[in-house]
Image (cartoon, helix red, strand yellow):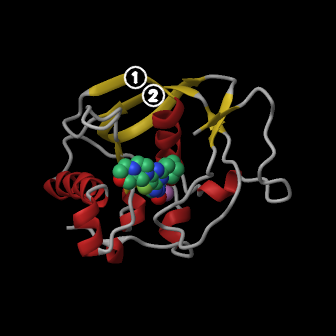
Amino acid sequence: MITMKNIIREGNDTLRAEAKKATFPLTDEQLQLAHDMMEFLENSQDPKIAEKYHLRAGVGLAAPQVDVSLQMASVLVPGPEGEAPLFKDTIVNPVIISHSVQGAALSEGEGCLSVDRDVPGYVVRHDRITLRYYDIDGNQHKIRLKNYPAIVCQHEIDHLHGILFYDHIDHEHPFTMENEDLVIE
Ligand code: NB4
Ligand code: NI
């Protein structure tokens, strides 16, 4: 199973590299990785398991974070208590094919499992995106996401291109935002 030991931290060049596109069918090793990444997210969101294995909670994990420079990321955005997740899939070769002009940022800023420090500030992203991606079986999906799940997917897609969340922060004015942009609680 993936634990924090398997997650590389800032300073490791893999986090700054452009990850390679996957080709289908995925190898057994790549399928195993997809399984392990989603299992990490499930474990990290289970308070008992997270405590036992010292996992930081996560709603996304990208392959480069476990030192695999491949365009694949798992996303698990929980829904309201007792309801289905808002978004759960392992996205392969994802591309944002269109997006809103309106921006959005999480009110608390962002954190990253590969960054062991708090970097305060709004990370302004697109509020709405149309995402094309492949699932692990090679089926193409084209979906519209907004608000929180859209932000999470953009954070993960950034990892596939060597971008970290704080690259987007205006460190001089970390909590200044355009009036038109949305703050997501
Ligand atoms: C990815 C996110 C950072 C901002 C927003 C949030 C958490 C991450 C990083 C956007 C994407 C991981 C991947 C959380 C979290 C809310 C939901 C459900 C129950 C606890 C969990 C806590 F843990 N970010 N961590 N950071 N990353 N919300 N939640 N809760 O997930 O580095 O590249 O379990
Ligand atoms: Ni991250």
> Measuring 53% from the left and 73% from the top, which residue is drawn there?
116
Give the amino acid at mark 1. Ile
Q: Residues within 10 Å of mark 2 (few under 14, many from 20)?
A: many
The one nearer the camera, 21 or 102, is 102
Q: Secondary structure at mark 1?
A: strand
Q: In the displayed structure, would residue 139 be above or below residue 18? A: above
Q: Is mark 1 within 8 Å of ligand 1?
A: no
Q: In the displayed structure, would residue 20 be above or below residue 135? A: below
> Measuring 24% from the left and 74% from the top, which residue is drawn there?
52
Quadrant for the C terminus, please: top right
> Measuring 31% from the left and 55% from the top, which residue is drawn there?
45
Q: Is mark 2 within 8 Å of ligand 1?
A: no
Quadrant for the N terminus, please: bottom left
CA–CA distance between discs 2 and 1? 5 Å
Q: In the displayed structure, would residue 12 be above or below residue 50? A: below
From the top left corner, tell me how far across and down residue 68 is, in percent: 36, 63
Residue with the mark numbered 1? 143
From the top left corner, tell me how far across and down residue 14 is, in percent: 48, 67
Q: Are marks 2 and 1 in contact (CB under 8 Å)?
A: yes
Number of marks in the rendered image: 2
From the top left corner, tell me how far across and down residue 91 is, in percent: 34, 40
Quarter where residue 144 is shown: top left
Q: Is residue 37 left or right of residue 176?
A: left
Q: Residues within 10 Å of mark 1 (few under 14, many from 20)?
A: few
> Measuring 18% from the left and 51% from the top, which residue is drawn there?
31
Q: Is residue 71 left or right of residue 150?
A: left
Residue 115 in sight in this render:
yes
Residue with the mark numbered 2? 131
